[in-house]
């Protein structure tokens, strides 16, 4: 699985998954993401604007990633969810644990504002 990503700043990486986020590619997604952030002090934004479907496997990955980011005093933000993804997030109430923003720019501004206080 190829997981597109880019560096927004020296401290922020933006991952851009697309298509279906389901059990068939969950392990590859997790491995790709951890390979990029390994040994780096990066905050993570996951832009899911191109994601059509998200399964419970990915919810578990996001929760695991949030736990790791909290332990390392870094930020995880998910942004631009489709209507389907937003409904899934509402059902599982993930926004009580993970910050969800409507767009990438707001997510970047939030991280920058919090890290440069």
Image (cartoon, grey):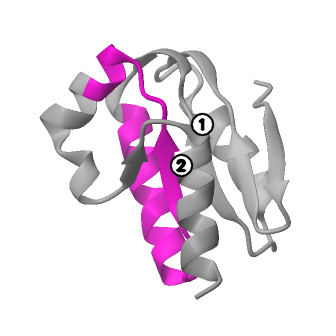
Q: Which mark is residue 106?
A: 2
Q: In this view, does 85 lie to the left or right of 27?
A: left
Relative to residue 74, is residue 103 depicted above or below?
Answer: above
Queried whether the magenta region covers residue 53, the answer comes back as no
Residue assigned mark 1? 27
Image point 36% across, 56% down: which residue?
98
Using a 10 Å C-alpha cutoff, classify the residue at mark 2 as few (fewer than 14 neighbours), some (14 to 19) or many (20 or more): few
* For residue 6, above or below residue 26: below
Between circles 1 and 2, the one closer to the viewer is 2
Residue lying at 22% horizontally and 57% vertically, measured from the top left = 96
Q: Magenta region's main secondary structure?
A: helix
Of 6 and 108, nearer the camera is: 108
Q: Where is residue 107 in the image (x, y as percent from the top left)?
A: 54, 52
**Is the N terminus in the top left, top right, bottom left or bottom right quadrant?**
top right
Tag 1's secondary structure? helix
> Is 63 within the magenta?
yes
Q: Is residue 60 visible?
A: yes
Q: Is 18 displayed left or right of 4 in the figure?
A: left
The answer to which quarter of the image holds residue 37 is bottom right
User: Does the CB distance between marks 1 and 2 fall below 8 Å?
Assistant: no
Residue at left 26%, top 35%? 89
Nearest the viewer among 54 and 116 is 116
Q: In which quarter of the image is the C terminus?
A: bottom right
Name the N-terminal-most of marks 1 and 2. 1
At mark 2, the secondary structure is: helix
Q: Can residue 74 be seen in this view?
A: no
Residue 109 place in picture, x, y as percent: 59, 59
- Between 23 and 99, the one nearer to me in the picture: 99
Which region of the structure is painted magenta? 57-86
Label 1, label 2: how far apart the Cα atoms are = 29 Å
Q: Where is residue 73 in the image (x, y as percent from the top left)?
A: 54, 82
């Amino acid at each position: 699985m190829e997981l597109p990503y880019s560096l927004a700043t020296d401290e922020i990486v933006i991952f851009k998954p697309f298509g279906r986020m389901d059990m068939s590619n969950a392990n590859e997604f997790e491995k790709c993401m951890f390979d990029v952030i390994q040994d780096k002090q990066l905050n993570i934004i996951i832009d899911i604007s191109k994601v059509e479907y998200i399964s419970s496997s990915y919810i578990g990955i996001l929760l695991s990633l949030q736990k790791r980011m909290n332990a390392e005093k870094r930020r995880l933000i998910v942004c631009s969810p489709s209507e389907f993804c937003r409904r899934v997030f509402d059902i599982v109430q993930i926004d009580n644990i993970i910050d969800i923003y409507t767009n990438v720019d707001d997510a970047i501004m939030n991280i920058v504002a919090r890290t440069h206080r």
